[in-house]
Amino acid sequence: MTILRDKPRGIQLSISLNFESSLNRWSGKPSPICYDNEVCEKSLAIEHDGSIYSCDHFVYPEYNLGNIKENPIPGLMSSETQINFGLSKINSLPKYCRECSYLFACNGGCPKNRIIKTPDGEFGLNYLCRGLKKYFSKIDPFMEILADKFKK
Ligand code: SF4
């Protein structure tokens, strides 16, 4: 894990990142955490009343899938609503991310963090992008070596 500090627009920013996850991505494998993968996965959130939501970052009425008292979880996980929720992570990527050399490692990050505009004015960029790019550029040479060993 590492912590980078940045000061975009005067705001102190700390980012915690996971080397294991990065190594998986550099090796062409899925990440153990949803943040770095292509689509949002099946990490549902359950509230105290049994309500189930697409993700713990999206506990809002429009992401309510049902209630555990009435709906079996496997059915909710494979529901069209949940599948579309997962795919929207990749479908909503701005062009800036789609053309980024670190897309394979980052996939734009969590959709919850995509709250700023890209340099060319498209909405939907992760506000942690600058820090992410610094992190990826620092670890890249080492990850290349480690990933090569990891694949063997
Ligand atoms: S590093 Fe930045 S530009 Fe590249 S994919 Fe991640 S969020 Fe998008």
Image: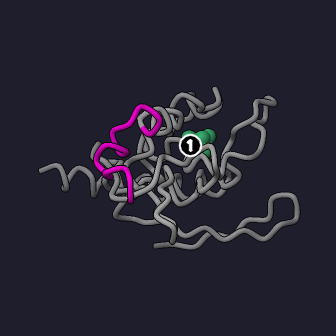
* Residue annotated with mark 1: 108
User: Does residue 49 appear left or right of residue 148 in this picture?
Assistant: right
Q: Which quadrant, please, contains the N terminus?
A: bottom left
User: Does residue 87 appear left or right of residue 145 in this picture?
Assistant: right
Q: Residue at x 73, y 65 (%)?
A: 6
In this orientation, which residue lies closer to the viewer: 56 or 96? 56
Q: Residue at x 47, y 56 (%)?
A: 52
Q: In which of the image's four quarters is ligand 1 placed?
A: top right
Residue 128: % across, % down: 66, 55
Q: Is 95 placed above or below 129 here?
A: above
Q: Residue at x 35, y 48 (%)?
A: 25
Query: Is residue 142 in sight in this rendering?
Result: no
Q: Is 5 placed above or below 44 here?
A: below
- The local crowd at label 1, few if under 14, some if 14 to 19, many if 20 or more residues have their Cα within 10 Å, is many
Magenta-drawn stretch contains 133: no
Bounds of the magenta segment: 69-82
Residue 144: % across, % down: 33, 50
In this orientation, which residue lies closer to the viewer: 56 or 14? 56
State whether label 1 is within 8 Å of ligand 1. Answer: yes
Q: Secondary structure at mark 1?
A: loop
Applied colour scheme: one colour
The quarter of the picture where residue 91 lies is top right
User: Does residue 149 appear left or right of residue 52 in this picture?
Assistant: left
Amino acid carrying mark 1 in the image: Gly
Magenta-drawn stretch contains 77: yes
